[in-house]
Amino acid sequence: MDQKTEEIVKALEIKAGTKQFIFRKTIETFNIFKQQIISVASEVGDEMKKIDKNIGVSAQDNGAFEAELKFSGDTLMFMMHSNVFNFPPDSEIHKSKYVKEDPMRAYCGMILIYDFLSDSIKYGRMNDIGYLIARIFINKEGHFFVQGKRQFSFMYNDFTEFEINPEIIRLIVQTSVLHTIDFDLFVPPFDEVKEVSLMQKIMESGSAALKTGKRLGFNYGEND
């Protein structure tokens, strides 16, 4: 084996092997997410039946990389990305002692949580908007941090200290629900919806031809 072949083999052993391990770790974590999504949906659903049977709560497994949690007019989509990521060289992640000791700790799998209107899915409104409310990064050692809105901007931001576990995953799911309930559907500005093409009207039926999102036409800022 020549020197370049040896270098390739060593690089694959270190980097590709680590990425495969992180992928499996993320799959394992996402499966726990699915369990907690079902658990939260069941518990909240049972309580809501005692209060108002018209407010349904349900969970659904959509395959290896997706699960959903539906409640009232919202559907949270939990999605695992199939790739493993590193962070830009100037990221704060690379400045921590934890990552400097082992740069491979910066490689992470990613789980994303999007908020969609349930009617967007029900009526097949393909132009409707879903909003990213959080994304979770998990490394080879199970250390993680969360980027997101409101509570998620400060709850789990210490990559060095936090390790993922079922209790934390459950809290992330519950916090996602609370965030979404508090994230209201606003009337879009008049000028944003004053026109609809005949093609849109023909291709889609009724209100399905109109693009809808909770903040359509508004600035979706850090405090939203």
Image: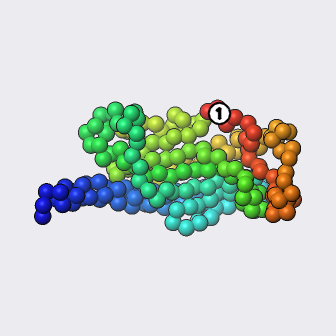
| Place of residue 219 in the rendered image (x, y in percent of width and height, measured from the top left) | 69, 34
Q: Residue at x 64, y 53 (%)?
A: 76
Q: Nearer the viewer, residue 130 or 1?
A: 1
* Mark 1 nearby-residue class (10 Å; few <14, some 14–19, many ≥20): few
Q: Is residue 104 left or right of residue 153?
A: left
68 or 51: which is nearer to us? Answer: 68
* Relative horizontal placement of residue 97, taking residue 113 as reference (left or right): left
What residue is at 67 percent from the left and 37 percent from the top? 220
Left or right relative to 42: residue 50: right
Describe the element under mark 1 as helix, strand or loop.
loop
Residue at image coords 74%, 42%: 216
Quadrant of image for the C terminus: top right
- Name the amino acid type tagged 1: Gly
Q: Is residue 182 above or below residue 61?
A: above
Check disc 1 and report the residue beneath it: 221
Residue sitting at the far bottom: 63
Q: Position of residue 161 (x, y in %)?
A: 37, 39
Pick the quarter of the image with the N terminus.
Answer: bottom left
